[in-house]
């Protein structure tokens, strides 16, 4: 038996697609953080396990949603994703194996209306695992559970439709870079001039050539440039946080 859990907000344009892809699972948990559209009304067509919780960061939100699941095996999806038929069959097989604690799953990205080329290197994330063996940390974004035990690699993918336009992708990297910079600052990491100078060109080369976004034509070039800008923003915002902290120290207690 497998539980599915989602963390959502204002996803009326996505929620039915993802929930329809998991409609045959007997336990579907949806945690909303303040939607003002029809997200929860539409979700109610697929499950009555609907919960509300104020936003405290992605990792904490997902940990809360996971804790509400009825089964030990849990599957996490985002509202802008979709479970494929191939992956569904593999997930059921994995959950029947007693010596496995989780599964690393490829993400099939769609950017500006098309799926990225099959030769492009896919991101992989642990989305299926035993909740008794896994837990999230405190990350604001790009959270990933730490899972103890044997992790298997699957080839069935999750479809991801979140980056439908350049505007959406740029807005996303702006928000995420702020959270990642804060995470790094709180962990004691600091910026450096060499990183500020090199992180953007190095990240572009990795994205465009090593991750093979070059197979996606102009879409791949645009996506790689935005990925490089995301890496630069994280370093720039980390430096900004350091300046703000120094200014506060100089001012002293108010």
Image (cartoon, helix red, strand yellow):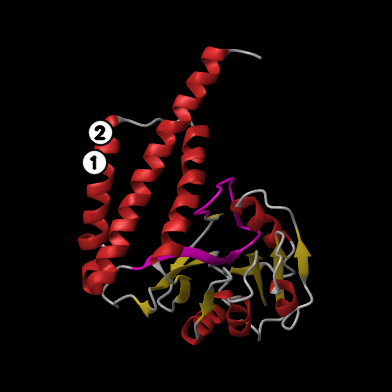
Q: Is residue 31 left or right of residue 216?
A: right
Q: Position of residue 163 (x, y in %)?
A: 44, 68
Asked whether, in this view, residue 233 is left or right of residue 197, the answer is right
Q: Residue 82, which numbered label?
A: none
Picture quadrant of residue 1: bottom right
Few, some or many C-alpha atoms within 10 Å of disc 1 (few <14, some 14-19, many ≥20)? few
**Disc 1: which residue:** 198
Task: Report whether 243 appears left or right of 41.
Answer: left
The residue drawn where x is 38% and y is 44% is: 233
Pick the front one: 171 or 223? 171
Label 1 secondary element: helix
Q: Measuring from the top left, give residue 68's x and y in whole percent.
A: 75, 63
114, 37: nearer the viewer: 37
Q: Nearer the viewer, residue 17 or 128?
A: 17
Q: Which residue is mark 2?
A: 194
Q: Specify whether residue 57 is in view.
A: yes
Q: Could you tell me residue 193's position as x and y percent?
A: 28, 30
Tell me the element at label 2: helix
Q: Which residues are magenta?
A: 122-143
Work out how far the residue at label 1 is from the one at label 2, CA to CA, in angstroms: 6 Å
| 243 vs 153: above or below | above
Look at the image and say whether residue 125 sits in the magenta stretch.
Answer: yes
Q: Residue at x 47, y 57 (%)?
A: 172
Q: Is residue 229 magenta?
A: no
Q: Relative to the observer, which residue lies in front, 30 or 95?
A: 30
Residues marked 1 and 2 touching at CB (< 8 Å): yes
């Amino acid at each position: 038996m497998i539980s599915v859990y989602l963390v959502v907000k204002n996803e009326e344009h996505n929620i039915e697609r993802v929930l329809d892809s998991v409609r045959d699972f007997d336990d579907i948990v949806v945690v909303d953080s303040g939607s003002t559209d029809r997200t929860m009304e539409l979700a109610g067509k697929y499950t009555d396990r609907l919960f509300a919780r104020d936003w405290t960061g992605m990792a904490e939100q997902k940990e809360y949603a996971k804790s509400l699941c009825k089964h030990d095996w849990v599957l996490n999806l985002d509202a802008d994703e979709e479970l494929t038929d191939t992956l569904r069959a593999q997930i059921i097989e994995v959950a029947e194996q007693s010596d496995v604690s989780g599964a690393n799953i490829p993400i099939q990205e769609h950017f500006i209306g098309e799926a990225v080329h099959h030769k492009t290197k896919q991101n992989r994330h642990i989305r299926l695992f035993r909740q008794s063996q896994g837990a999230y940390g405190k990350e604001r974004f790009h959270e990933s559970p730490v899972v103890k035990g044997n992790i298997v690699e699957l080839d069935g993918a999750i479809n991801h439709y979140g980056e439908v336009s350049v505007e959406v992708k740029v807005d996303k990297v702006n928000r995420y870079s702020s959270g990642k910079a804060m995470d790094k600052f709180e962990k004691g990491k600091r910026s450096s001039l060499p990183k500020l100078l090199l992180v953007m060109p190095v990240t572009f080369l990795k994205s465009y050539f090593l991750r093979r976004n070059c197979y996606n034509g102009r879409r791949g070039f645009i996506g790689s440039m935005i990925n490089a800008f995301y890496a630069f923003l994280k370093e720039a915002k980390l430096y900004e946080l350091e300046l703000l902290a120094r200014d506060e120290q100089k001012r002293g207690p108010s």
